[in-house]
Image (cartoon, rainbow, N blue to C red):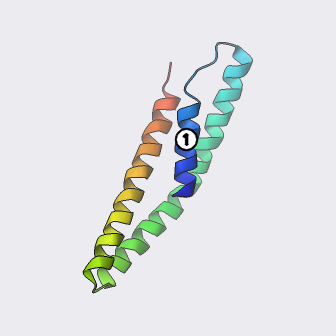
């Protein structure tokens, strides 16, 4: 979640698109690196999500089940937001 928070803040702070060709190249390279990092985190996300679902199925305590459900929902929501913002950033004219 910490990496996702940092990534969202980073995407939000880089809203302005440069006009200078060198700055545009730099921004494209930075975004390409970010997308590479995001792709590398996909397996971590998938594993964390699967593990959380498995724990949720094994718990017998309602409070634990609800807490795990909330945590998994928060993870999925944040992941979806980051992926969406990344695609938006890539498609900015």
Q: Horizontal and vertical percent for residue 2?
A: 56, 56
Most extreme residue toward the left is 62
Most extreme residue toward the right is 22
Q: Is residue 19 above or below residue 39?
A: above
Q: Is residue 34 above or below residue 91?
A: below
Residue placed most toward the observer, 61 or 82: 61
**Dot 1: what SS?**
helix
Q: Horizontal and vertical percent for residue 35?
A: 58, 43
Q: Horizontal and vertical percent for residue 19?
A: 64, 13
Q: Is residue 51 above or below residue 88?
A: below
Question: Count of labels shown?
Answer: 1
Residue that appears at 35% across and 71% down = 68
Residue that appears at 53% across and 49% down = 5
Q: Which residue is disc 1 drawn over?
A: 9
Residue placed most toward the observer, 22 or 71: 71
28 left or right, relative to 73: right
Q: Quadrant of residue 29?
A: top right
Q: Horizontal and vertical percent for residue 22?
A: 74, 19
Q: Is residue 32 above or below residue 5?
A: above
Residue that appears at 42% across and 44% down = 81
Q: Quadrant of residue 24?
A: top right
16 left or right, relative to 58: right
Residue that appears at 52% across and 51% down = 4
Most extreme residue toward the front is 63
Most extreme residue toward the top is 19
Q: Residues within 10 Å of mark 1 (few under 14, many from 20)?
A: few
């Amino acid at each position: 979640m910490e990496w996702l928070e940092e990534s969202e803040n980073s995407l939000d702070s880089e809203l302005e698109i440069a006009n200078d060709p060198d700055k545009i190249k730099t921004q494209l390279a930075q975004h390409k690196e970010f997308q590479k990092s995001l792709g590398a985190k996909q397996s971590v996300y998938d594993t964390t999500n699967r593990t959380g679902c498995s724990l949720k199925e094994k718990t017998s305590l309602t409070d634990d089940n609800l807490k795990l459900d909330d945590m998994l929902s928060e993870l999925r929501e944040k992941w979806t937001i980051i992926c969406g913002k990344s695609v938006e950033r890539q498609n900015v004219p």
